[in-house]
Structure formats: structure tokens, C-alpha cells
Amino acid sequence: MGDHTVMNGKPLASIISVGMSKFGKRDGVCARELFTEAAIEAFESCPILNPKKDVKALFVGQMGESFEHQGHTGPTVLDWVGLLPIPAMRTESACSSSAVAIRAGIFAVMSGLYDVVMVGGVEKMTHRTTPEVTEYLAMACDYPFEQWQGVTFPGLFAMVATAHMHKYGTTEKQMALVAVKNHHNGAMNPKAHMQKEITLEQALSSRVVAWPLKLYDCSLITDGASCMILTKPELAKKFTDTPVHIIGSGQASDTIGLYEREVLTSLAAGRLAGEEAFKMAGITPSDVDVAEVHDCFTIAEIVAYEDLGFCKPGEGGRLVEEGATNIDGKVAVNTSGGLKAKGHPVGATGVAQACEVYLQLTEQAGRRQVKSAEIGLTHNIGGLGATGVVNVYKRG
Amino acid sequence: MSEPANTICVENFYKFVSEGKLMGAKCNKCGALHLPPKPICANCFSTDLKWVPMSPRGKLVTYTVIHVAPKQFEAMVPYPVGIVKLDDGPQLLGRIRDIEPEELKIGMKLSVDFEKPSTAQTQWPTWPRYYFKPT
């Protein structure tokens, strides 16, 4: 926990605009162009903002330079959005790379150094073969004791699933229900990669990737970019009548190797990040109306319910079975379709989650709108939970 | 120039593996046993650690069966991978051999064995591998 975590709901920073590229298989465009697509939407959604004059720094999350053989992403995407010569910085923490960028943006405006900053994320993945993407994504877990020993990234989450099934009786059907729910939501999101419903039977009969996880338990390899404009809370109303305030932010770390951990049914970094964010925001898990959580695999969403306190440890499978996390449920989870159906361009995911929460809290989520949502949450996991980031948001 | 054999590092762990030895890093100050080997004892913050032999025996705590594998493992699919809690305390991940996937059970006793080091180097990023087999 940080040294000064009790803010009692005082806004840390405010989102005045968001933008997202279309997520999907985006042949013919590269990462910098995807990022530009997201940035243009964020600029156009906030006509009072003068990007050239107002935006003072960029923080952009991206996981891997292997995908495009391109490093130094900060100044590259900054140049493409026409904002040279302000400072630009890339943040990397595997699948949570842009959630960490949000925190960098929060620090930047809270420090008083900048009034307005741009935060985003990007990944271009689908031009690579599946074995190549599998190899690059595996870099998020330990090399000498995991990758080298023949385990894959899905294999590691599969071991979390096996442990969860053994300890709590969680079933393959309950995991499949996460996929069914998220595909249902994704079908209502025009930006989602996979806009189609799936049946429980389809999910359960899909081919095994790493037992007990099957194809429909896995998120998608996707191209996409996400972007938002952050400012000091006291300046937010200068730019928009409907800002969204970030009122809590937590981050924690864990061992790079899953194999070192005593507890394999929970991701401690996500749990600790959540505890810090809730404390800072002065709220409890039951106050959350809408949440985007890290469903890189269906088991990860079930674990997230438990780590965030939406239910007790071991009850995550039942929570989805009861429909409590549907759009009209007790807490709507992954209304965007999640990583499962909206897609998971790894570096873009953290900010894309925040984009969905922003849309929900400003009543712009269309057919997937959660009625009068006031409090939102994002939960983003890097790798096998070596990084966990949770942010809490409130309608401004 | 390589590190001295007593340096607590990944490279030396795998040099021991190539000799058919499973070694952990023991803290000379508080006695905690660490695997993977790390140069600082996370328990007491001492940097005074030494290599000690570890029991190769342990119990399976979780597992998966890999059906979609990276290129170098593709010929072996489907193959099981598990995390084993060694009798000395630390946990280790590796492939489980000489067993049918449906025979795997959490809690079953497994022990560490070593691949023949003939082809593998003992340098990052390739080393001889260890694996688990039924006791």
C-alpha cells in the first residue's frame, strides 16, 4: 500500500474524453495508425480541447516490440498524432501496460507538473502467426523456470483453473458461462472484435488448448488502440459537462513465476491493488455498479470476482451462474465484451477498460448501458498476476 | 567469463541440473531455503546464501495438459505440466513424464529427474531440463 492511500473519495484525476480504434483483425494498418484512430476520436469527442495547446505529455502502454519489430513507441505514436515535441513515454507491464500508463498519468497531473495529459495503449498482433504470438505473449511469464520447461501462457492459467476446481468445485461449465456472457455483451459493442453470441454447448465443445481451458475460454488475439485525456479534477468542467473522476487507484506486484506461490486460486496482486483502490475511494465492493475485469481466460474473471470482493473466495463460479454479473445483475462485469469478445490487444487493454467505464458512467454505452451507473471499476492483470492494477471511477 | 560455481544465479542452478543435481539456495542467516535461487534472502534480507542439495521428492499441487504448444514442444502434445511442492518446501514447475494425463491427481507423489544433457547447452537461453515422474 502507498503511504498516503486514504483520500476518502477525493478525485485524483479526471477523464474528459476517451477514444478507441475499432478492435479486430486490422489488416493494412500498423500500431501508430491504430493509435491515431483512437486519438482522433478522443480529440473529436472533446471540441473544447485544443490538443496542440493543452496536451502536455503522453503516456502510452505497449507490451511487445517483437510484434512489429518496432521499439520507442512513445515518440512514434506522438509524432503520428501531431503532438511533437511534448514528452512521450512508453509503459510496459505485459497485459497491464496501459493500466500502468493511467497511473503514470494520474501521477503526472497530481504532481502539479501538467494540467492535461494523454494516456493510451496500443498493440498490433494479428499479422503474426499464432505460434509467434504465443511465443511473444509467453514473455510475460518467467523464462528460465516456466517457458523453458514447456508451459504456455494458457497452460499457466489452466493450472490456476485446475487448482480452483480442486479446491472449490468450480466447473468447466461455470467457466464457459463467463464466455457466453461476455460474447453476449460484445455482440452489443460496435467496437468489439467478435460481435456474435455463442452457446454454452459451443464453448464446452471447443477444442482443448490447455486442459481444462478450451478455445472459448481464451481471449482473442486482436489489433487495437485506446486513448483518454486526463486532467486535474478542478479543471475538468472547463472541458466537459460530463467528466468521470478517478477516485481510487491501486497497484501491486507478485512473483514473475506462478510456481513460486503458495496460493494458486487467487492473484494476490489484483486483490491487493483492489484493496488499495477501494480504501482510497472510500467505497466497498458492493458500491460498484459496473466493472471491467481481466478475463484473459474465463477462470481469470472468476478469480477476479473473488479477489475484488464481489463474492467470497470459491463462490465466483456460482456468481456468474446466478447471472449476478450480467448487465442487469448486482454488478455488471465486462459489459464491453471483455478481453474475451471485445478482444485483447494487450497494450491497449488497460485504457480500453477505462474507456468502457467512461462510456457507462456518461450514459453513452448504447444497448449495453447499465442503468444509472455511478461507480465503475477496472481490474487489469499483467502476465500471471505479477502486476495487478485496479482503478475506481465516479460519475462527475 | 562465467560466474564462480558458488554464485547464487540461474545459470549455476542449471549447471547443477546438467550434473543431475537439484540444488537450492539456503540463507546462512535465517535458514530459509529458496528456489528459484535469488541473491537476496526475501525472508531476512541477508545476501549470505549457499547452495544445498534438495530432496527430489514432492507432491503435485496443480497441473494442466498442454494441447497447443510452442514450436519446440509441438511433437510432444498433448503433454502434462505441473507444479510440485518439494518435500523441502519450495515449488517447481516442469513436464510430467511416464504417466497418462488421466492418471494425474492433485496430491500424488512425484519426483524430479533429469534429461540427458548431451544436446543442451548450459547457457542462457538453453539448458538441460529437469522433469517429474511418478515416484
Image: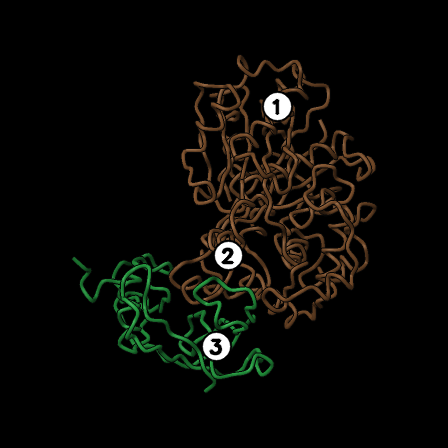
Chain colours: A brown, B green
Q: Which residue is disc 3 drawn over?
A: B96
Mark 2 Cα within 10 Å, few/some/many (few <14, many 20+)?
A: few
Secondary structure of the residue carrying tag 1 is: helix
Q: Are marks 1 and 3 on the same chain?
A: no
Q: Which residue is disc 2 drawn over?
A: A131
Pointer 1 chain: A
Residue A54 location, quadrant: top right
Q: Nearer the viewer, mark 2 or mark 3?
A: 2
> Residue drawn 42% across and 70% down?
B90
> Residue drawn 36% across and 71% down?
B129
Pointer 2 chain: A
Q: Which residue is disc 1 drawn over?
A: A40
Numbered badge on residue A306:
none
Q: CA distance from mark 1 to mark 2?
A: 33 Å
Q: Nearer the viewer, residue B56 or A395?
A: B56
> Residue drawn 76% across and 57% down?
A320
Pointer 3 chain: B
Mark 1 Cα within 10 Å, few/some/many (few <14, many 20+)?
A: some
